[in-house]
Amino acid sequence: MDTFSGKTAVVTGAASGIGLAMAERFAAEGMRVVLADIEEAALGSAVERVRTTGAEAIGVVTDVSKADDVAALAKRACSEFGGIHVACNNAGVFAGGLLWEESLADYQWVMDVNVWGVIHGIRTFIPIMLEQDTECHLVNTASMAAVTVMPFAGIYHMTKHAVLALSEALFHELAVTSDKVQVSVLCPELIKTGIATSDRNRPAKYSKDGDVVESDARQLVMDSITENMDQGLDPSVMADRVVAAIRSGTFYILSEDGWRDTANQRMEDIRTGQNPILMPPL
Ligand SMILES: NC(=O)c1ccc[n+]([C@@H]2O[C@H](COP(=O)([O-])OP(=O)(O)OC[C@H]3O[C@@H](n4cnc5c(N)ncnc54)[C@H](O)[C@@H]3O)[C@@H](O)[C@H]2O)c1
């Protein structure tokens, strides 16, 4: 897809970080933008920010873990703007700690947003795109965590591996069923966003009965992410990469930094059958 102007983009997790950067970038390309997020106030500000550029934009409060919410989002986008040409399943959250200490609520929350959010997006947006029979593009936000595995972030890695696998399968399925609908998977490295404070939008149902374990390991990993956040790239770099990938029909949108070496080491461990070597990205 290489013309964007006048078309419609839907972005989940668009009130902050990478999602907001993509929404702004699509608006700059002349697209009409539907911003979706669970955080209503931040979503309102994000929509205003996009509108000040002169772009047409609406906000739809959406919990991507709920199939009905994602269906309502798509319906609203179609009724408001007449169709959906780009959809970004981007909303995501992080919780860290030791796998045997983390609560079931942590597992459920991160799975529900990071994996089920993408599943609902695929099941909702792809049929609409196929039905439209025009050039369309779906972008799933995974992470370099999808091709690597680090300790203290096991749940997050598991969910991002799932997003990558779903996206690769979708790529193959679309290749044999459509010449107009394409998919890319965005695998960011460290980006300066609100991800370290994901808990700000954690629905109460995932915190009931004090199920969240405030362990030392959890604190350590959250502190470490917060401390390193300043070294992250600006989210607009991801938006640039996404637009370039949609234009060129590129599936893998990967980082160029040390995460690549970490991923290569992991593949080498698997290839040779040796025990996993811990190689954090430099
Ligand atoms: N920041 C990084 O370093 C990094 C690296 C790799 C991948 N990612 C991925 O990028 C994506 C965007 O995250 P970000 O870094 O911009 O973080 P962010 O916290 O700035 O933005 C995430 C947005 O998702 C929203 N959200 C959370 N739960 C939701 C739900 N149930 N339904 C709808 N929206 C919900 C939040 O309100 C927030 O606005 C995520 O999938 C994340 O895993 C981030």
Image (spheres, rainbow, N blue to C red):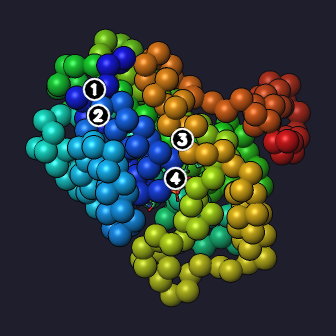
Q: Quadrant of the N terminus?
A: top left
Pointer 4 residue: 17
Tell me which amino acid carries mark 1: Ser
| Residue 107 visible in image | no
Residue drawn at 42 percent across, 73 percent down: 203
Q: Residues within 10 Å of mark 3 (few under 14, many from 20)?
A: many
Relative to 229, is 80 above or below? above
Q: Nearer the viewer, residue 22 or 92?
A: 22
| Residue 41 visible in image | yes
SS at mark 2 in the image = loop
What distance separates the C-alpha of mark 1 from that of mark 4?
23 Å
Tell me which amino acid carries mark 4: Gly
Q: In the shown orientation, is residue 146 left or right of residue 123?
A: right
Q: Residues within 10 Å of mark 2 (few under 14, many from 20)?
A: many
Pointer 2 residue: 31
In x, y percent, where is residue 76?
A: 16, 49
In the rendered structure, find residue 236 and report the number of the disc placed on it. Answer: 3
Counting residues from the start of the chain, the first of labels 4 and 3 encountered is 4
Residue drawn at 75 percent across, 57 percent down: 228
Mark 1 Cβ inside 8 Å of ligand 1: no
Mark 4 Cβ inside 8 Å of ligand 1: yes
Q: Mark 1 or mark 4, which is nearer to you?
A: 1
Counting residues from the start of the chain, the first of labels 1 and 4 encountered is 1
Counting residues from the start of the chain, the first of labels 1 and 3 encountered is 1
Pointer 1 residue: 5
Counting residues from the start of the chain, the first of labels 2 and 3 encountered is 2
